[in-house]
Image: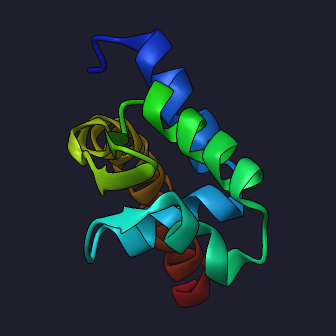
Amino acid sequence: MVEDPAGMDEVFHALAHGARRAMLRRLAERELTVGELAEPLAMSLAAASKHVQVLERAGLVKRTVTGRRHVCRLEPAPLASASAWLNFYERHWTERLDALEALFTEEGTD
């Protein structure tokens, strides 16, 4: 199912914070500087940089530095692994909920 549990831990840790999820959402549209990522979140450049570092450790963001300009882009591959892991459990819970629904339907016809 998932071949890199340590990497998966980093991905879920990165996704656990709302600011980092917001950053990823915006990076899915286009590359942004760290300052641009910080702006709508009303956080300092230093705080935004720390969030970007967490995303980089998880492999979700690639940062390119040109002079003082730090440009970030989304690296979606780790999200595919997280999605595959979640899909396994989605199938499990869908089956369980379908069985529960069948039980209630069966009881309703009695």
Protein image colouring = rainbow
From this view, report whether residue 87 is shown above or below residue 24: above
Front residue (pair 40, 83): 40
Which residue: 60% across, 77% down?
Answer: 107
The picture places residue 72, in percent across and down from the top left corner, at 36, 53
Front residue (pair 110, 20): 20
Q: Residue furthest bottom?
A: 109
Q: In which quarter of the image is the C terminus?
A: bottom right
Which residue: 62% across, 46% down?
Answer: 49
Which quadrant of the view contains residue 41? Answer: bottom right
Q: Is residue 100 visible?
A: no
The picture places residue 36, in percent across and down from the top left corner, at 51, 73
Q: In which quarter of the image is the N terminus?
A: top left
Which residue: 78% across, 67% down?
Answer: 43
The picture places residue 39, in percent across and down from the top left corner, at 64, 78
Instruction: Count how many numbered circles sit on residues in the image.
Output: 0
Q: Is residue 77 visible?
A: yes
Front residue (pair 88, 12): 12
Which residue: 32% across, 45% down?
Answer: 79
From this view, report whether residue 75 is shown above or below residue 6: below
Front residue (pair 105, 6): 6
The picture places residue 18, in percent across and down from the top left corner, at 69, 63
Q: Residue furthest front?
A: 67
